Amino acid sequence: MAMASVNNWSEGLSDEALEIQSMAKAFADKELAPYMTEWDINETYPLDALRKMAQLGFGATSSAAPVLSRHDAAVGFEALATGCVSTTAFITVHNMAVWIIDTFANDTLRERYIPHLATFDKVASYCLTEPGAGSDAGNLATSAVKKGDHYILNGSKAFISGGGDSDVYVVMCRTGGPGPKGISCIVVEKGTPGLSFGKKEKKVGWNSQPTRAVIFEDCAVPVTNLVGKEGQGFSMAMQALNGGRINVSACSLGGAHAALEAAIEHTNIRKQFGKPLADNQSIQFKLAEMATSLVASRLMVRYAAKQLDGKTPAAGAWAAMAKLQATDKCFEIANEAIQLHGGYGYLKDYKVQQYMRDLRVHQILEGTNQIMRLVIAREMLK
């Protein structure tokens, strides 16, 4: 029985979604998979590949007038991530920033930025996390004090994907009092005096995308760069994270799918004690568990995406459940794939170790999986 018969990622998809999946997988096989190892080892930022991805419609998938539904975008991101998890995940972070501008900004800001961001002529970074405010984002400290026709920003953001290379920074900063209601959203362009960046971080995975601190020192930004109204920034950030959680979960599915395929191939070829590893019942059981976890995770991610498309009241909790399930289980799948490869799985010549390294951070970002449990429980106990 072929793997596709029990792990059919096309099951139940509409004709449009099937077309998106097929297009994304063909792109991943040609433009991403052959280079993912090189990009990882050399820490290459493949801007050309990202722009090609944007040409397929993945540069602004979750705008207010979406090119793709959340569900169909998740299908596409899963397929793309089979080629390179890190590069695909980067464009999903860009999409969070694009969605905020397109959904909440005035027409002037939208017309200034969205056409360039959608094509990846300009790249956007989502700036929420700070050195002293990770999970406790409502207590962020970066300030924006209004002086005349400018906001003066002071503070810093940590672990920012694209930091130093992106052109546009969608920044959550404090314009009012303490707590979430004092937070606003301001767009800061690269090159603005007072904006600087920390060193490029050396990371375990996600090496095809640069990560740096973003630093504001008396950084003057026109008041016209305020997105929405003062005090709305935290709500915008949280809503954007709901989509981000779906998308990063989809990237986890793609990495796990590729890792499972590699494990099946290896255990069918590798022989020990005179027979293929796959002939051993213990190996069969492990492969069965991996496939079951992957399919269950995929079903939850796609269902959660549909909840977000439908704007149902509990969509945020569904996004949290999908992230908790998919990112935990998909990391386990990639980790088990290494074990099934034996010593070969620990070599960088084999992609399974990279899938594992790239997937690990998905359990941390877009809200840690511990915070996901809180989001789910709060919805249950309302």
Image (cartoon, grey):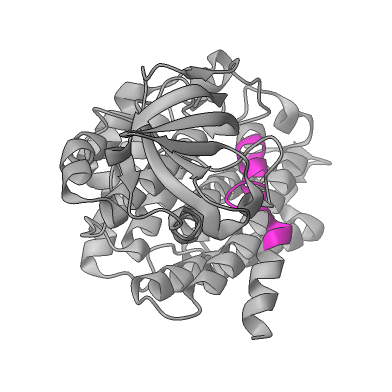
Q: Position of residue 367 (x, y in %)?
A: 62, 53
Q: Main secondary structure of the magenta part?
A: helix
Q: Which residues are magenta?
A: 356-371
**Nearer the observer, 244 or 253:** 244
Residue 262: quarter of image: top right
Q: Residue at x 57, y 58 (%)?
A: 180
Q: Position of residue 323 (x, y in %)?
A: 59, 60
Q: Tell me if residue 80 can be seen.
A: no
Q: Tell me if residue 197 can be seen.
A: yes
Q: Residue at x 68, y 44 (%)?
A: 133
Q: Is residue 124 left or right of residue 196?
A: left
Q: In the figure, 47 relative to 278: above or below?
A: above
Q: Which quadrant does the C terminus fall into?
A: bottom right
Q: In the figure, 309 relative to 145: above or below?
A: below
Q: Is residue 359 left or right of residue 289?
A: left
Q: Position of residue 110 (x, y in %)?
A: 21, 45
Q: Is residue 105 left or right of residue 260?
A: left
Magenta stretch containing residue 93, yes or no? no
